[in-house]
Image: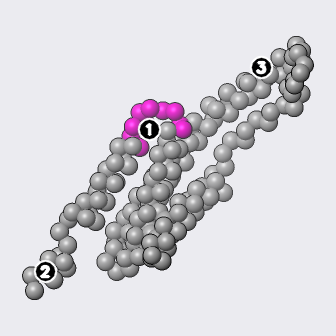
Amino acid sequence: MLKIAYTFFLGIMLAIFVGFGIAAFYEQPAMPKWPTELLTIGKESSLEQEKTQKEFDAKQEAWNEKMRPYNRNVSIMTLLAAVIFVAISLLFEHKISILADGIMLGGVFTLVYSLGRGIASQDSKYSFGIVTIGLIIVLTLGYLRFIQPNPELAAKLKK
């Protein structure tokens, strides 16, 4: 039971590590601050408030336009990290299985994060590409881990 908990904890920590690492070194565009003068509880909005609202809406739209490529770039970086994690887990699968399992799970969690950021880029072709790459990674991982004949296991079964 402790090994399973450790595997999940390692996987989650790797995904968080990637997310925070990207946030630390590749800052997202600053979100516009909502103007407090737009607070109109129980009051009718004035022409000044309507002008302020339109200015804020324009700033918000500009920020949304900056976030699309940012999300795409973050998705690419996290996808690369996920591929690296999966490759490392496959390399160490037979040597340090508990670490390999945690790293593999970290790769899967990072891949899910990458998919979310890819969808947030609001580019349907890019999102489809990311989902396709994710599917290929998961299918390859499943084949290499569970379907491909294991020579050590085959040798033990022959005895």
At 10% from the left edge and 86% from the top edge, which residue is drawn? 159
Q: Residue 69: x percent and y percent?
A: 56, 38
Is the residue under label 3 in contact with that under label 2 (CB below 8 Å)? no
Query: Relative to 8, is 109 above or below?
Result: above
Q: CA distance from mark 2 to mark 3?
A: 73 Å
Query: Relative to 125, is 98 above or below?
Result: below
Mark 2: secondary structure: helix
Q: CA distance from mark 1 to mark 2?
A: 44 Å
Mark 1: secondary structure: helix
Is the residue under label 2 in contact with that under label 1 (CB below 8 Å)? no
The verdict on residue 125 being magenta is yes
Front one among 5 and 135: 5
Quadrant housing residue 149: bottom left
Dot in front, 2 or 3: 2
Q: Residue 54: which disc? A: 3
Q: Amino acid at mark 1?
A: Ser
At 62% from the left edge and 31% from the top edge, which residue is drawn? 65
Query: Relative to 66, is 130 above or below?
Result: below
